[in-house]
Amino acid sequence: MPRNSFFPNPDNKPAGFSPATRVGNMVFSSGQVAADTNGNVVGEGDAGAQSEQVFNNIEAALIAAGAVMSDVTKITAFLVNSEDYPAYAAARAKAFNAPGPASSTVFISGLVSPAYLVEVEAIAVISG
């Protein structure tokens, strides 16, 4: 089965990975961080604002691949600070209708840049 890569912003393609990859009716989003379309950090020091940007980035990647947020079946979140979990959870609740997708959260020592507090990857299954 062919694998296709998708980029929400064709003018700003990251090197070495695809924001979203689709195989059949499954879409896998790469881990998304709180960067805007120009690569600038959004919400530096604010895990809630970063989490909202992360979910916006996931949505953009999914749409580029032909999926929507309601197609998401599983997310995995990586948080640098455990005390940021409530802010992250609030943003997650806003991003998905209840009960939301299956979810795991892992606390880690750091992400690709010290400015990032949250990274989330998603798996979606497109119905129909």
Image (cartoon, rainbow, N blue to C red):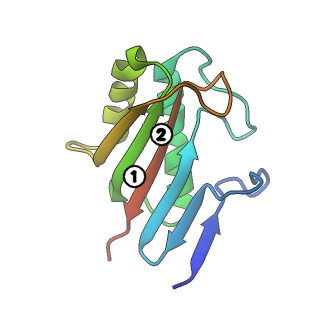
Residue at the image position 37 percent from the left and 22 percent from the top? 85
Q: Nearer the viewer, residue 27 or 70?
A: 27
Q: Secondary structure at mark 1?
A: helix
The percent coordinates of residue 106 (x first, y second) are: 40, 34
Residue at the image position 41 percent from the left and 74 percent from the top? 25
Left or right position of 104 against 3: left
Q: Nearer the viewer, residue 16 or 68?
A: 16
The mark found on residue 118 in the picture is none
Left or right position of 116 against 89: right
Is 23 drawn above or below residue 123 in the view shown?
Answer: below
Residue at the image position 48 percent from the left and 47 percent from the top? 121
Is 1 drawn above or below residue 36 in the view shown?
Answer: below
The percent coordinates of residue 45 (x first, y second) are: 58, 14
Q: Residues within 10 Å of mark 1 (few under 14, many from 20)?
A: many
Between discs 1 and 2, the one toward the N terminus: 2
Left or right position of 111 against 97: right
Q: Nearer the viewer, residue 40 or 82?
A: 82
Alpha carbons under labels 1 and 2: distance apart: 9 Å
Q: Residues within 10 Å of mark 2 (few under 14, many from 20)?
A: many
Q: What amino acid type should be assigned to the residue bearing mark 1?
A: Met
Is the C-beta separation of discs 1 and 2 under 8 Å? yes
For the C terminus, the image quarter is: bottom left
Q: Nearer the viewer, residue 65 or 88?
A: 88
Residue 2: image quadrant is bottom right
The percent coordinates of residue 43 (x first, y second) are: 59, 20
Residue extending farthest to the bottom is 1
Is 49 drawn above or below residue 52 in the view shown?
Answer: above
**What residue would you read off at disc 1?**
69
The mark found on residue 55 in the picture is 2
The percent coordinates of residue 3 (x first, y second) are: 58, 76
Q: What amino acid type should be assigned to the residue bearing mark 2?
A: Phe
